[in-house]
Image (tube, rainbow, N blue to C red):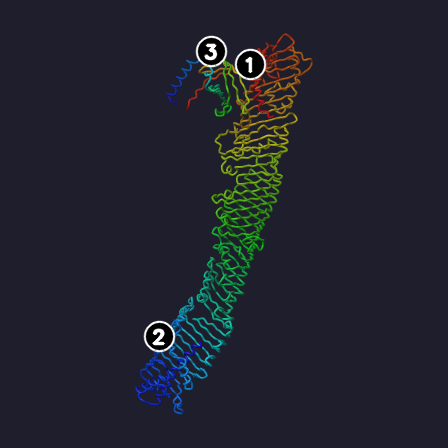
Amino acid sequence: MKRALKITGISLGCLLGLVIIAVVIAYSTITSPKRLTQLVQKHVPKFIDFDLQLQQAKLTLKTFPDIGLEIDGVTIMSPMEGAPSDTLAHVAKLTVGADAKRYLNGKDIVVKQCILDEVYVNLFTNAEGKSNLDIFSSESSDTTSSSFESLLDLQEVKINNAKVLYNDQRSKLSADARGLDLDVKGTLDLKEKNVNATLDLGTKQLRVNTEAVKGDLKQLDLGFDGKIEGFNKIDGKLDLGSTDASLFAGYEVLKHDKINLSLPVAMMIDPLGGHINDAAIGLNDYKIALGGAFQTKEEGIETDLAFSTNTLDIEDVMGKLPENVRKSLADMGIKGKATLTDGKVKGIVSDSLMPVITAQVNATDAQLRIAQLPYPFTNANLSSKIHVDLNDSINVNDIQLSAMLNRSKIDVTGNVTDLTDDMAFDVNLKSNLVLKDLKKLLPKTMSLGGQGDLKMNLRCKLNELLGAIDKLSFDKLYTNATLTLRNLVFDMDTIHAETPKMNLALTCPASRKVKGRKGAYLELTSGTLDAAVGQAIQAALKDMSVKGNADQFKQGIEQMLAQVDINFSDLQFAYDTIQCHAVAPNISLETSPKKKQGLNVKAGFKSNALNAEMGETYKLKTQALAMAASARQDKSKTDFFNQWNPDADFTLTKAEIDIKGVDEKVYIPSIEFDLKESELLFKNGGIRIGRSDLNLKGMVSGIKPWMENHDNLMMAELTVNSNCLDVNEIMELTSGLGVKADSTLVETPEEKEDNPFMVPEGFDFTFNIHSKKAIYGNFEFNEVEGEATIKDGTLMLQEIGFTNEAARMQLTAMYQSPRKNHLFLGMDFHLLDVQIHDLLHMIPEIDTIVPMLKTFDGAAEFHIAAQTNLKSNYELKKSTLRASADIEGANLRVKDITSYEKITDMLKVSTNGEYKIDSIDIQLTAFKDEVDLWPFQIAIGKYKATVDGHYNWNTVGEYHISVTDSPLPTRLGLKISGPLNNLSYKLESCKYPHLYRPEKRNDTEQMVMELKKKISDRLKATVRE
Amino acid sequence: MNAKRYIYCLLGMMMAFCLTSCGPDEGGGFDPSALVGHWQEGTVHEKYFDNGTGYTWDTADDVSEEEAQPFEWSLEGDQLIQEHILFEGQIVPRILTITQLNAFQLVYRDTGGVTHTFTRALDIAP
């Protein structure tokens, strides 16, 4: 500035020197223009040492009453390499006016007017700093100026239509002004360096170019009215205006804008400082009122200014903000009107510092569009305080904003900080939300309906907020919110929920509520809520309370991170044919998404009381049910349960299962089992069915394949410990499981009435049974040990050992039900140390097969194997009956003494009054309805006899007794025939005199004995040691 | 059934008639091979195979051939032994006395003295 003033002073001094010379010559000679010109040319070198040319000088009356000299074609040459022209300056016509009165009185030439027409100025400085102005050496200038300081009393300087070029290659600054007019009126006191002037400067175009700035001002008017003292202290008013101003300073600050500046100023140039009073800055239609002070300090210029604006178009103003600011707001679009009042600019201005600008911002009827939001905020009315600290941040404080988000009304109070960097919010938000307005914020698979009253305190950064909105990830938000929802309808994937009212409290991040939790923490309560998962699952919930955190659910439920605890007072649940009612259940859920593998879920369920029904067949009541499950989502599956395939641990306490058609209920005091994919592991506990109690341990596998297709096999290896097993009840309970409904068999009406036990199909079950007592029919057995298997339609009791008061027993039995009217029953039964009357009591059918057995009593060993097919009503198919038995006894008592005495009498056998038989070893076989009593020997004292028989189930039989050993010489035979209740006795010849004398047997007798042994051996072969 | 099949059956029956005896052979026995085949007495069927096995079923009890019960058999003289085998390997032997065995008829007497008369059934594929 100082240098510019110096150069200006020197230039003016030189010009004035010329003027004075011209005037002196004029006044001295009053001669012709030619003469006058010669005089000027002659005297110029005395005052200046550079190349100055002029064409013609003449006197003029234009400056009357001052003496006027008019010089045409004044040119100052200053050739310099690189400069656009050798001409430094050219003035087409120079007119000066000198005070005639003072000249005439004291020979003083005092220049009062100076008028330059058609001026050309070419200022050039090369890269080394050498300027074409250097021709004005400081020594000559100083001399010249000192010579003329007292001769200047400029009252008017005019420049008309000047063209000024300025090119400074060192500072890379160029400028040019065209059509420049200058009118300066006042006084210039070079001695005191005072200027008292009124200045009007107008230029058609001023262009300025630097590396950083490009300016283009058209129709620029600059006016100054005031004084400058000592070329330093300015006191006046500066007016500046351009009708078309463009300025590029890294971005388009002005673009063909109209600018105005009215600057009353009282300031010092060095050091820079002063006051601005009631300044007005205009930009197009915008007005900024400005006032205050500024002062140079060591670190820069200290400002303390106040400003206010008229109504601004926000969108237009935003377009004029620095690019970095606009970039930071790229995701936002703002429209509307705003005013800035009570503005302040306070602080240091320097190369590295900028002052703090604060202002009250009021906006009305504005619209704010944020890219991440589906709808703009409209009808926005804002009151806030903006705080611009370009050294630090831009903040908006004391915000009071009301706006509409589509159909939702939103009121916001609070602060937004760091606008240009990482915008941060600390706001309170109230809203009457229409939930459908949130649709575009939600995952595509989620939709909401209903309305809500929202109160929210939000503390977060914009990136965090936008990230949270964009990704629905709430870990970095800091917010508290309460939301009351009415008529809520929620859909996400296959999940549907609706409730008339729901209260929701949200806290972000969740770690503020529960240490270590992620995402958003939610507390949710609802009086009633209906929910569904696809078509398969329906649920009705009462007094629901949900507490938990959730995060990352933008991609839907598959990627959701959640830890949720849910309580209800009442839950009703339906899946397919399963109906469930739980009292005060608790559900806990924890998810951990795996991008490729789908969602992992851990779930827990506890209920105080639970009732469940499966169709009309099964009903479950339990006082407590606990379930802990984990599942991994299999996206390749479509069905809900197949997709999740849970691994679940169940604990059932005091449960009761009612099965339709089964009289006895199943009670479960307590049982723990794990359900894992296709496996069911019974860990502990037991069940009671009627009189039976079962404690199960072991594994059931292949459940899922079997459920999907009953052609697949379900397998089990279970240990059953029991105090009591009622086989009848268990058979009734399990009858028909897995039997295909689409049997091709055509049933007769009679068969339809029958409901025989059908062995479950598709099962391979092995039960290792340990029961203290078992009940079958009317019998009780103790210490039952053995293996029961159900394998693909065959029920097998394998070498079950047990005892009762009558005998030690071992049973192997097989039951098959290939079709209802063709059942199969086979048994291999061993009674060891059995009393014959107990045997007949336990198995009355033996009396049918061996009717004579009831005539004896005593200890015996009994082995029987029998098999038959049965009709659907369990009636024997006689054609299929096969049985073989072996009975061995000793010291048997005879119960039918009358028949016994008759036989012994007829056979002349002496019993000595003892009614007993020393030993028997009987084999008998049954084929269809006929029984063969294979020849056997009995011993009665000294007598031995061989007995055989053949009879049918009508008890019509024929027996033969051959006395083979007797003290008497005769060997009699006795035939006993007819029905048992009316036998006839007839002596006949001895039929088996040699059967028990091997050396005398014939082939047939030998074969009979071999078959007897084979029958016996085969029967005893299966006795377990 | 077509005519050709009837003719084959008739020829077969004539050959069987010519080549089989009506009573025991000179040693008092019957040829076991003559027993092989399908015999029927009313609803009762018995089938004997040359490997000493066979099975029986009675359609009156709603039992089909597929559900028939197995036995092993042997023939010594006129003594036909059927050993019916139970599910755990036990046996139910029957000693039957054959009185007639030829291409068309099998007659035996069981231990109860009941005589059973079977005729050979022709298994002709449908």
Say which element carries label 3: loop
Q: Same chain for the residues at labels 3 and 2, yes or no?
A: no
For residue A716, the mark is none
For residue B25, the mark is 3
Residue ID for mark 2: A80
Disc 1 is attached to a residue of which chain?
A
Label 3 – label 1 distance at C-alpha: 23 Å
The vertical placement of A986 against A486, above or below, is: above
Label 3 – label 2 distance at C-alpha: 157 Å
Label 2 – label 1 distance at C-alpha: 154 Å
> x, y percentage for residue B10?
40, 17
Report the side of A2 relative to A92 (left or right): right
Question: Three-letter amino acid code at disc 2?
Answer: Met
Q: Same chain for the residues at labels 3 and 1, yes or no?
A: no
Task: Please tell me which residue lies in front, A975 or A546.
Answer: A546
Say which element carries label 2: loop
Question: Three-letter amino acid code at disc 3?
Answer: Asp
